Image: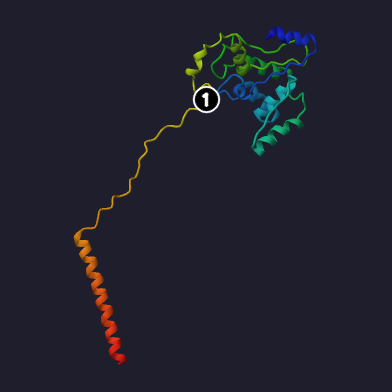
Amino acid sequence: MKPIIDYCQENGIVVEAYSSLAPITTYPGGPVDIPITAAALRLGITPTQVIFLWVRAKGAVIVTTTSNKERMKEYLAVNDLPPTSLTHEEIAAIDHAGANGPPPGPGPSQSEFTSFLSSSSSSSFHLSPLSRILSSLSSWSSPSPPKDASLDVDLEKSPLVLPLPPSYPTTTQTPPMRHPPTKITLVGVITILLLSITSILGIVLVLGGLLC
């Protein structure tokens, strides 16, 4: 990677790198908390705004997004702050703390990679740790996996393979069986029909007698 960066610097080619700021700014109890908090108290701004000022001082571009309206106002307010709000000592303290901070996850040891881009120009910047970039670089030199490696995929590490939802026992409801009518039921139905017919005939006879 370093030969590529050197070639770009010699030929005036811009090198752009991406690294999430959250791992190096929100690590619980991390060394970066101390210089960021001190600068935030001095300037009366938030720690996030201090980091944005630090990125601007390094000549890097801030790419951010949020769906929270108040947080977006916090981000945009950095544009109203002077680019030189942070002192050289504060910038150097953040650089030093970021280089000594623990990486936010498994990957190459921090002692192997303590800086990403350094030069004598004022536009050089130091973003550390760059876990995502370092992980991708380390994968370039790893041997090719066997052809049947797809049969043994780590579902927790592969973003392209989604675990199947847990299976739950299913129950099938069978409709109640209909039993054939018994003799007692048939006798009852016939009796009710005969009584109904008898009642109707009685009513007809009574009406006929009244009319006559």
Residue at the far left: name it: 184
Whether residue 172 is visible, yes or no, is yes
Residue at the right extreme?
A: 12
Tell me, yes or no, if residue 152 can be seen here: no
Please state if 11 lies on the left or on the right of 184 as rendered: right
Which corner quadrant of the image does residue 194 belong to?
Answer: bottom left
Q: Quadrant of the C terminus?
A: bottom left
Q: Residue at x 46, y 29 (%)?
A: 164
Image coords of residue 56 (percent x, y): 74, 23
Q: Is residue 25 left or right of residue 171?
A: right
Q: Nearer the viewer, residue 11 or 51?
A: 11
Query: Badge 1, how many Cα within 10 Å: few under 14, some, many 20+?
Result: few
Mark 1: amino acid: Val
User: Is 124 drawn above or below residue 163 in the view shown?
Assistant: above
Residue 49 position within the rendered picture, expressed as x and y whole percent measured from the top left:
68, 29
Q: Secondary structure at mark 1?
A: loop
Q: Which residue is mark 1?
A: 161
